[in-house]
Amino acid sequence: MYDTKWSFYVEATIRETMSRFSLRPTDRLLDVGCGTGALLHRLSATYPGAQLSGVEPVPKMLAIARRRLSPSIELHEGWAERLPFASEQFDAVVSCNMFHYIRKPIAALQEMRRVLRPDGQLIITDWCDDYWSCRVCDLYLRLFNHAHFKTYRERECVQLLQEAGYAVVHIDRYRINWLWGMMTARVMKDTA
Ligand SMILES: C[S@@+](CC[C@H](N)C(=O)[O-])C[C@H]1O[C@@H](n2cnc3c(N)ncnc32)[C@H](O)[C@@H]1O
């Protein structure tokens, strides 16, 4: 249902996100808010040797991901603000179309930082409030969809990432069609 209704959007955001980072052959990656597993599915085809994991709080979404993905991909029920993993486990943490749900964004970014290895990278794609169409959607959803929390402008996103301890912040802004304006942030855990 989610995949069918949102197929253009999911395809486009996966393509844009994957074009902005790469993995080494055996890297370990975590997808936070993996939903039905669309990004993990694509990553497993592109990087067959990578060790992929996903975390998702909604059991129905997770069940679809379980059916779709190879059993070698580890899936866990859990929240971004309290990731069910030991520290410094992952070479990459990625999150696509999830950040506007987060009620405690700094806590979530700190958790993602905690589970990254020292040279690990964080990649986040979500709507960007610098586009007027996204600001309208954000206001509408804040009023009528209680699951939605907030979307951010690029400068707010930089501020959040810096507050959570990431030093160099690189953000690309782009449209995937007339309605959806996106941003992808790619940052390293440690930049020294
Ligand atoms: C719009 S869907 C995107 C799913 C997938 N990442 C994609 O791009 O197809 C957002 C997902 O984030 C999950 N989510 C919501 N709040 C979350 C939180 N606090 N921590 C982790 N995931 C969350 C939702 O359950 C949902 O599956």
Image (cartoon, rainbow, N blue to C red):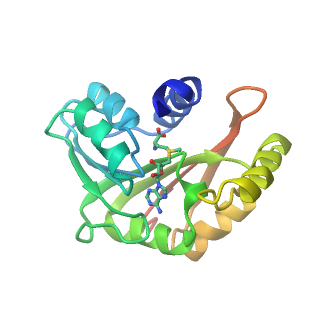
Give me the residue at 25% from left, 66% from top: 85
Residue 26 visible somewhere in the drawing: yes
Please tell me whether residue 127 is drawn above or below residue 82 in the rendered image. above
Extreme left residue here? Answer: 72
Residue 70 location in percent, x, y? Answer: 18, 33
Residue 153 occupies quadrant: bottom right
* Res. 153 in view: no
Horizontal side of residue 33 vs 51, given as left or right: right
Query: In percent of the image, x 18 and y 34: which residue is there?
Result: 49
Query: Which quarter of the figure has residue 23?
Result: top left
Percent across and percent down for residue 174 are 70, 36
- Give the percent coordinates (x, y) of residue 14: 49, 32
Q: Position of residue 180 (x, y in %)?
A: 71, 35
Question: The C terminus is located in which quarter?
Answer: bottom left
Q: How many marks?
A: 0
In this picture, residue 66 sits left or right of residue 55: left
Q: Using the image as rendered, state which of residue 101 and residue 120 is in the foreground.
A: 101
